């Protein structure tokens, strides 16, 4: 099952790499296959899908931006989310999720600024990037939870 999820992940990353307007959404979509592997087979299989998808994406895809985004945030986030949501307390969960997101955004900002954010050149823009990024991340996390819940309740139960 992990091989199938890895293949779907790489296909999603491939489409993201050749379709620039859908790059972010399709890269986020690729992370759903990590979540599906966790639901079907456990956390370690989700990790396998993340590692294999990352490696194959970097090796096979012509445009490295989608697999890079997958490696730097979207790919491992379902694993982190699964671990965080085992902790009691919604406030602590959201604090940890936001810390993970902001750490990933900071790594992207520091090391890949020119690649992803070359248009940002002042402190106000950086502050808006973080504020807007956190808002979009909260929506992403909420939507991701709903899709994963749908998968767990409908697809997984029927299988």
Image: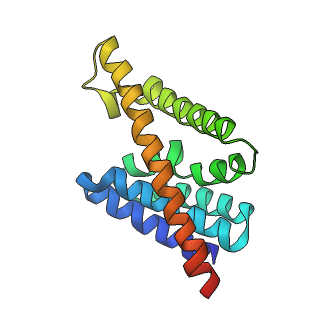
Looking at the rendering, which quadrant does residue 78 occupy? Answer: bottom right
Q: Image quarter for residue 129?
A: top left
Q: Residue 75: percent from the left, percent from the top?
A: 54, 52
Instruction: Residue lying at the far top in this picture: please name it.
Output: 123
The x, y position of residue 59, in whole percent, is 48, 56
The residue depicted at 54 percent of the width and 55 percent of the height is: 54
Q: Position of residue 111 (x, y in %)?
A: 46, 27
In which quadrant will I find the N terminus? bottom right
Q: Is residue 17 above or below residue 158?
A: above
- Is residue 94 visible in the rendered image? The answer is yes
**Vertically, is 150 above or below 98?**
below
Q: Is residue 80 left or right of residue 69?
A: right
Which image quadrant: the C terminus? bottom right
Depth check, front residue: 3 or 139 = 139
Give the side of residue 98 with respect to residue 93, left or right. left
Q: Position of residue 149 (x, y in %)?
A: 57, 66
> In the image, what residue occupies the spot 64% across and 82% down?
157
Residue at horizontal 41 percent and vertical 26 percent from the top: 130
Q: Nearer the viewer, residue 47 or 96?
A: 96
């Amino acid at each position: 099952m992990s091989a199938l999820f890895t293949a779907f992940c790489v296909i999603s990353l491939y489409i993201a790499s050749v379709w620039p307007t859908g790059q972010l959404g399709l890269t986020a979509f690729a992370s759903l296959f990590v979540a599906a592997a966790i639901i079907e087979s456990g956390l370690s299989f989700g990790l396998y899908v993340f590692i294999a998808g990352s490696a194959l994406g970097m090796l096979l895809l012509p445009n490295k931006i989608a697999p890079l985004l997958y490696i730097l945030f979207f790919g491992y986030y379902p694993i982190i989310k699964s671990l965080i949501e085992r902790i009691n307390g919604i406030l602590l969960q959201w604090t940890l999720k936001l810390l993970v997101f902001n750490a990933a955004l900071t790594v992207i900002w520091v090391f890949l600024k020119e690649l992803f954010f070359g248009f940002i050149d002042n402190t106000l823009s950086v502050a808006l990037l973080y504020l807007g990024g956190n808002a979009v991340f909260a929506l992403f996390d909420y939507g991701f939870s709903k899709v994963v819940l749908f998968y767990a309740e409908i697809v997984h139960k029927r299988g």
